[in-house]
Image: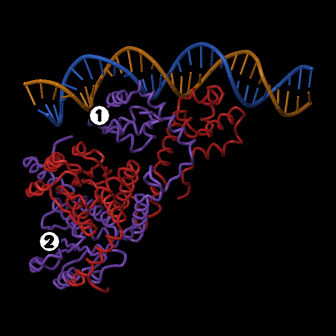
Chain colours: A red, B purple, C orange, D blue
Amino acid sequence: MTDAKQTISDRIQEQMDALTRAERQLALSILENYPASGLGPLAALAKGAHVSVPTVARMVQKLGYKGYSDFQADLREELGAIAKGPIAKHETWAGAAPSEHILNRFTDAVIDNIRNTLAHIDPAEFDAASALVADPSRHLYIVGGRITHTLAEYLFLHLQVIRPHVTHVQSTSNTWPHYLVNAKPGDVFVIFDVRRYENNTLKLAELANARGAKIVLFTDQWRSPVHRMADISLTSQIIVPSAWDSATTTMLLVESMISAVQTLDWEKTKDRMEELEDIFDQTRLFRKFT
Amino acid sequence: MTDAKQTISDRIQEQMDALTRAERQLALSILENYPASGLGPLAALAKGAHVSVPTVARMVQKLGYKGYSDFQADLREELGAIAKGPIAKHETWAGAAPSEHILNRFTDAVIDNIRNTLAHIDPAEFDAASALVADPSRHLYIVGGRITHTLAEYLFLHLQVIRPHVTHVQSTSNTWPHYLVNAKPGDVFVIFDVRRYENNTLKLAELANARGAKIVLFTDQWRSPVHRMADISLTSQIIVPSAWDSATTTMLLVESMISAVQTLDWEKTKDRMEELEDIFDQTRLFRKFT
DNA sequence: ACAATTGTGAAAATAATATCACAGACGACA
DNA sequence: TGTCGTCTGTGATATTATTTTCACAATTGT
């Protein structure tokens, strides 16, 4: 509403005129290396600004804090808010709903997950994974578990259009050993394994690994044990205000990968898509209009 | 290994495998609000990560620091270095990647989709839909199409735990007429239909509607023709830099709804979940830890 | 049943903060 | 130039907060 919270930096600048010489000197020193210097011990800050300890103590009180620790706590909070970035402010989207509404709380959490996930992903690894998945000379097996087989299938449905030799395997079914006997060294397994890691998935990964296959793993921040066998692990943060974990972030990664793979050989993808169009036309699966 | 300055974040990630469960939990907590959380008092950090004080003390030593203060000093130094460096501005999600990287472009688009979607959703409608879906006195049919059946199944798998009488129907299979004959007035159809609207789905909706069933529709911004029969339509924006549309936003809505429904009768959900736990224990489907 | 991990509660050691009194420095002003 | 009031630093001390460590019990996976 009224006062969007003022940064400490602002508050200091504002008070600047009301400060005395030594205090101003201190203030400038704080702003110079903001906010790191304010987060150290009081004595260090004093020394860095070439002022005395009591000067620091006196100033933070002048700024309206109960003490130096209070001041630091505020600084830390601000630092946390900065890191969260501008999008996290859901004033941006909270249309009609109050911010306590589950839609907003949930979305907040998901955006947070996305931000954290992206911050910890190595783009080179992502590209390497995409290249593996795109390589038509390798047979591609996509493996999902009890819940994650939905993501696996989503990936499968799209890759199927982009390239040949793609197989969807459900680790919870008992048919998967059949697929494994065909796996050759150099083939690629895309494995989904998130919390409530599944024994079947692990076994499958072990066998695939033993046969010399490459493994690309989609997992969560706690990392499935499969990651020890994986050539590349892509981890998502999946915490939401719910009894279950969120698959949205993983979905985002999957779609990004689809997009990346499709770009790697767009000409061929386009051709395949057009062929598929024709077939769909013939089956009248889709509506032509409205 | 030339040790060009390694960030603490890197160092933690690197050691991640050598860490134990509680330590990993702590590490993730540090990374989650990095670096702010590491700059507070040790006890606060421990509490925030839900681990004990000694665990924190043990871990910082494992990371090679003399003590927590030592660790903090390093964090502050790093923070100072960042601030000094090239004006690190945001809008790139994957910090390490250039903003043209597909990960960043895709995520930008998705965040945009989310924001737009939320802005246009009426929370009252969402709540009404949740209530319909949660009502155990109505049989619930969940319907998906060629691609969207993955979302449908995702919803199905979770609702199955929350309530009885849930059925997953694939509109592309030719078995769905069998389900329809059982449908009673007041039963609820949750229908997914996004671009490349499917004829089968429309027909199914028409029949369901004719039998007096309620329809909750998940669709995209262009709205499936099913919306004319739907009691409640939830529309997502689905544009991304890809040859295909994005399901991520729809997934977000689905998960939000799962969370909302579960909350409506949490006691019963909890009981059902516990029963399920037991069964899983017996089947040894899941690993207990690590 | 065993080994490893983790939490508990407590105590001791350390570090940091908050204050105080006082003296020197400085500028304002007569 | 001298006086005054304000500001500042010094050094010391009391107080509080934080870290560090310990032994032991509980838990968990193997």
Between marks 2 and 1 in the image, the one whose residue lies nearer the viewer: 1
Question: Measured along the vertical axis of the image, is residue B124 above or below residue D6?
Answer: below
Marks 2 and 1 sit apart, C-alpha to C-alpha, by 50 Å
Q: Position of residue B270 (x, y in %)?
A: 18, 53
Q: Position of residue C29 (x, y in %)?
A: 88, 33
Q: Which chain letter matches label 2?
A: B
Question: Is circle 2 on the same chain as circle 1?
Answer: yes
Closer-to-camera residue (A178/B250): A178
Q: Which chain letter matches label 1?
A: B
Type of residue at label 2? Answer: His
Q: Position of residue A35 (x, y in %)?
A: 55, 40
Q: Mark 2 — residue?
A: B139
Secondary structure beneath disc 2?
loop
Q: Mark 1 — residue?
A: B18
One can see residue B224 in this view: yes
Q: Is residue B260 left or right of residue B57?
A: left
Could you tell me if the residues under marks 2 and 1 are in contact, i.e. CB atoms within 8 Å?
no
Instruction: Answer with the quarter of the image where residue B124 lies.
Output: bottom left
Among the two numbered marks 2 and 1 on one chain, the one whose residue lies closer to the N terminus:
1
Type of residue at label 1? Answer: Ala
Secondary structure beneath disc 1?
helix
One can see residue B244 in this view: no
The crowding category of the residue bearing disc 1, from other C-alpha atoms within 10 Å (few below 14, some 14 to 19, many at least 20), is few
